Amino acid sequence: MSRGRKILVALALVLGLAALLLQIGRKMGILNSEQLGDNPTAFIFPLQKACPKAYTALLDDREIDIRVVFGYKDARPSRFVGDRYEKAMLLQYLTAPCTPGWHACGFTRSDSDPDQLHKTSLTAGKVLRDFKLTVVNSAAGPDDDENRRDGFQRWMSRRAAASFLDGIEKADVVFYNGHSRDGGGPDFAPPKLTLDKHVDYDWYAKNRPGVEQLMERLSAHGKGVDLLGLFSCASRGHFLEEIRKARPKLATITSPRLLYYTDALRNLLAGLSAVMGQACESDFNAALRARAEVGNSLLKGLFP
Amino acid sequence: MIALLFILASWTPSANGAVSWQMQASKLTGYSEAIRNEALVALKKTPQIQDKLKAALTTSDRYLALDVMSALGLHSMVGHLLEVSEKGDDGAIHLTINTLVSGDNIQPVLEKYVLRLRRSQAPAVKVAILDYLGRLGHRLGEADLAALARSSSFEVRSAALYYARLMLGKLRKADYYHVFRRTLQDAATPLRIQTIYTLQELPFETPAEWKNLEVLCSKDPVEEVRRLCKELRG
């Protein structure tokens, strides 16, 4: 047997063994360590290395204002609305103790407004920063029919929209996790429906209420947001071009395809951890795609 | 040759099938109704789908598996889900149980749920349970609900109030006075605001004693709460 053939056989043997071990590992639950339940490590992707230079502008203030706003996550034509639950799930992770390389954790909540979270930590550049994190959702309850009759729903929608839009003007990082409404989002209120109780996508595509408000704020003078993450279905195609026209240098995280709800949540958490840990570009991207079951998110513009 | 055998040995039908059901499951949300229906048909035809879904509950595919259970209406899974969620849940399993409970298996679920509300559970679990009991109109005693309204979790306190809103809408009579009294004095401003909206929309005349609640909120330290309270007083 020639030397080249020997190398090929050895390589095939190694690959075969690796495949077999992977399979055994999966079956035994060794390599698939995402045993969930109360284990707050399910969405964690530890970062390996920090690149503080890329974050100089983003983290230049003593207080870092980060907004995570859940849009109104209805499941029309079904009546179920899920953002209240997703927010509760997210908060479990944000308030859990930290582990090495994971930064979206260890937050404490304010008593007077539990949607305000706080954490003081040293950045990779050894500078002390106060991370002020706002996490709000849009739905008053889990039933869209019921929400439409609830005055508190209007208050919730107003507050969520205000937190998002004010964040575009004033915050350092804004993450939206919700529906794209076929380009008419972001949306924080019960959707416009057709007679058969489906979302009226034609209306949203024609009127584009959410994105118009977003563009208005992006074009406003002032500091403006440094990183905008839109964790919603096909947000890249729906929104990115207009966003970059309004603010060419704005760093963005968008999704090229439909985004399953747990992927949106995982990518959001990974993005948050990456910012707070000042992740290098490869780590940031890897984190955004790390746990994607059926969708991923793409970072653009943060690294030169 | 040996390597090929290794690869073939590791390429088991279950691994192959798992990919297939995951892909179908991902089409259950966000796609057109036609695509969703095609996915449902494919999922129904998947061999040993129930076993695969059960196995997936301890992996990263658990959310997809739970979606499939709901979409296929696998009522027979309720017992297993109740058992699995005993060990811990972030709310997702309980939400799935809520979609699968039917007349036959409702009683054991209700009993477990009431017990779980009294025990230490993740806030998201308690929220899912309270929402379900409220939707069903299953009455919790005032002491139980008042305890939940004092929970250290804001989400649980808010869900307790939401439960009271649903129940009073169904019962159409005054109840849970002490729960409202508690939430109107909560440290969290959004909870006090939620309470005022709830009181504003009660579908019945409130007893004279309930006027005390209006007095309480009229003295609130936050201007927005006082303003809303004024509307409550009419």
Image (cartoon, helix red, strand yellow):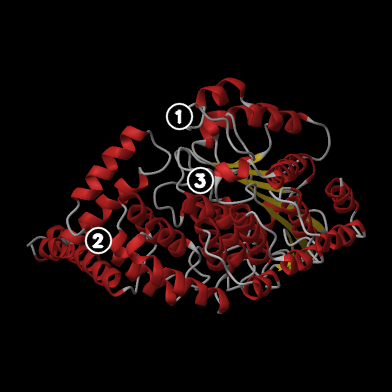
Q: What residue type is labelled 1?
A: Asp
Foreground tag (3 vs 2): 2
Report the disc number at residue B50.
2
| Dot 1 or dot 3, earlier in sequence | 1
**On screen, A107 above or below B95?**
below
As helix, strand or loop, the secondary structure at mark 3 comes to loop
Report the quarter where the C terminus of chain A lies: top right
Q: Is residue A241 left or right of residue A234?
A: right
Q: What element carries label 1?
A: loop
| A18 is higher (above) or lower (below) than A225 | below
How many residues crowd around disc 3 within 10 Å: few (fewer than 14), some, or many (20 or more)?
Answer: many
Between the residue at mark 3 and the residue at mark 2, the CA separation in whole angstroms equals 31 Å
- Residue A297: which disc? 3
Residue labelled with disc 1:
A196
Q: Which residue is drawn at 37% across and 55% down?
A: B64
Q: Are marks 2 and 1 on the same chain?
A: no
* Label 2 packing within 10 angstroms: few (<14), some (14-19), many (20+): some
Q: Is residue A131 visible?
A: yes
Q: Residue at x 64, y 39 (%)?
A: A189
Q: How far apart are marks 2 and 1 (CA)?
A: 32 Å
Residue A73 rendering spot, x and y as whole percentages: 55, 45
- Label 3 is found on which chain of the structure? A
Q: Which chain is mark 1 on?
A: A
Q: Position of residue A238 (x, y in %)?
A: 54, 30
Locate residue A224: give its quadrant: top right
Q: What residue type is labelled 2?
A: Gln
Tell me where residue B6 sits by quadrant. bottom left
